[in-house]
Image (tube, rainbow, N blue to C red):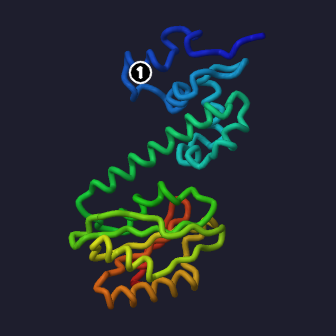
Amino acid sequence: MEKNLRITDWALEDRPREKLLAKGIQSLSDAELIAILIGSGSRNETAVELSKRILAGVSNNLNELGRLTINDLQQYKGIGEAKAISIVSAMELGKRRKISEILEKKQIGSSKDIFELFVSLIGDLPYEEFWIAFLNRSNKIIDKQKISQGGVSGTVIDNRIILKMAIDKLASGIIVCHNHPSGNKQPSTNDIEITKKLVEAGKFLEINVLDHVIIANNSYFSFADESLI
């Protein structure tokens, strides 16, 4: 039986690991980086060729690759569970690094900052999640936390729980954020009503609701930007 084509079977100059060591990681293509992750190809193609085929399936868009599940990846011939897990894990590390970079910022200065913080967490999800960012007086994020998870069309939140958490964390302000899996970033009537009630409740406790950001794929809607808060 013919063995899978492994990286060690290639010409020295074609091996991604050796290329990385000789020329630096920036010299590697996206396909070569994925090839290092999966280690081997199928019977009839190298790991790089297999990686190129996967990338072609998502129009060479790494954001789209990050949306693939383990089951999605296993639909590609030559990708088993272990290889799929390696790819998904690498994409998750990339998301977490991006989030860490945003959290290190001194201040949240705009709705775009919030979008960039949460898009990696909820932008790709097929169901709704509701998150809160807790801020101090300097608008620096103290913490972030998921409040609820729902279905495709909605999720349920409790303003009392949100404000209690803000008090416990000694937050001066909060920003709420949730996603619309439908891709429609416009707020629903329920979104508007929830936000209005949360703003009013926050006033009594001197906790400012600074914004409510709705993420829909790679776009977003900000209540603050639209003067709805």
- On screen, residue 50 versus residue 172, left or right, reads right
Residue 77 rendering spot, x and y as whole percentages? 73, 30
Tell me the residue at 43%/84% (across/down).
198
Q: Quadrant of residue 80?
A: top right
Measured along the vertical axis of the image, is residue 72 above or below residue 212? above
Q: Which residue is mark 1?
A: 20
Q: Residue at x 62, y 36 (%)?
A: 84
Q: In the picture shown, does residue 61 fall above or below 35?
A: below
Looking at this view, is 10 or 190 the one in front?
190
| Residue 5 image point, x, y percent | 65, 15
Residue 107 lies in quadrant: bottom left
Residue occupying the point 49% across, 56% down? 121
Task: Check disc 1: other Cα within 10 Å, few if <14, some if 14-19, many if 20+.
Answer: some
- In front of the other: 45 or 3: 3
The number of discs equals: 1
Which x, y percent locates residue 187?
54, 78
- Name the residue furthest right: 1
**Residue type for callout 1:** Leu
Give coordinates of residue 180: x percent, y percent: 58, 68
Along the horizontal axis of the image, is 183 left or right of 110? Answer: right
Q: Residue at x 31, y 82 (%)?
A: 207
Nearer the observer, 71 or 159: 159
| Secondary structure of the residue carrying numbered label 1 | helix
Q: Is residue 61 above or below residue 185?
A: above
Dividing the image into 4 quarters, which one contains the C terminus? bottom left
Where, quadrant-wise, is the N terminus in this rendering? top right
